[in-house]
Image (cartoon, rainbow, N blue to C red):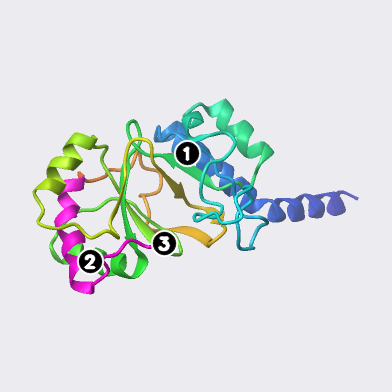
Amino acid sequence: MREILGRRRKLRSKRSGGRSDQIRAALTFATAWQWPVLPGVGPKQTGAPGCACPDADCTVPGEHPFDPGLLAATTDERMVRWWWTNRPTAPIVMATGAPGPCAVSLPALAAARALTALDRAGVRIGPVVAAPDRWFLLVAPYSLAELGELLYAKDWVPGSLRFHGEGGYVVLPPSETGQGQVRWERAPLPGSASPWVPGVEAVLDVLVETLTRTGVSAPEL
């Protein structure tokens, strides 16, 4: 009888492994790294395309906050634990801007080339989030005024380069959205304190140059 109960516990643990990974990651982001998070709306059903929100034409299926809204993002352990206990497969959405990092994103193919260019140039980068269509380079928090000065100094900035600052958000791994799995392309070091991230000015020139050379300049719809 003990062997049967032990086997049942083992099987249950195996089936719920993904769920425990999700809540563990959310708690690490919120409590250890002080990145404000909240649950995303998620896909219609796990592994299926489409968004669970009421908008039939949702352009970011499963990736965005819905209920609660973005302003509810928090680092409170009890709230985060309650959210993912009740919605164990919900995507983990991070509100960008202090106290968490901001982000710069670009189409996946161009992003892969940009990372190679940054490595060749000896530019130190932080964590990189890879969604099916776009990659997100996490950077230090910046203000709109600081970003405006950087962009004003450029002759031209490709429309496919997007900036996720105060009031924005990024979906973090391990999340499943209506477009597929979100993963780390460059993962934070395991067991570290809040991951180091560069200033946006350190990566901006290479990202603009890469997008210009590859011809990926128009914003994606």
Q: How many marks?
A: 3
In this rendering, the answer to whether 198 lies above or below 135 is above
Q: Residue at x 36, y 59 (%)?
A: 135
**Magenta: predominant secondary structure element?**
helix
Mark sitting earlier along the chain (1/3): 1
Say if the magenta span includes residue 203: yes
Q: Which quarter shows the C terminus?
A: bottom left
Q: Residue at x 50, y 26 (%)?
A: 76
Distance of label 1 from label 3 (alpha carbons):
33 Å
Q: Amino acid at mark 3?
A: Leu
Helix, strand or loop at label 1? It is helix
Please tell me which residue lies in front, 1 or 207: 207
Say if the magenta span includes residue 175: no
* Residues in magenta, as a range: 200-220
Helix, strand or loop at label 2? It is helix
Classed neighbour count for the residue bearing mark 3: other residues with Cα under 10 Å, few (<14), some (14–19), many (≥20): few
Mark sitting earlier along the chain (2/3): 2
Distance of label 1 from label 2 (alpha carbons):
33 Å
Q: Amino acid at mark 2?
A: Leu
In this rendering, the answer to whether 216 lies above or below 129 is below
Task: Describe residue 36's horizontal placement relative to residue 119 as left or right.
Answer: right
Nearer mark to the viewer, of 2 and 3: 3
Mark 2 lies on residue: 211
Please tell me which residue lies in front, 136 or 68: 68
Q: Residue at x 63, y 31 (%)?
A: 82
Query: Which numbered circle lies on residue 221?
Result: 3
Q: Amino acid at mark 1?
A: Thr
Q: Residue at x 39, y 35 (%)?
A: 33
Task: Describe residue 178's horizontal placement relative to residue 216 as left or right.
Answer: right
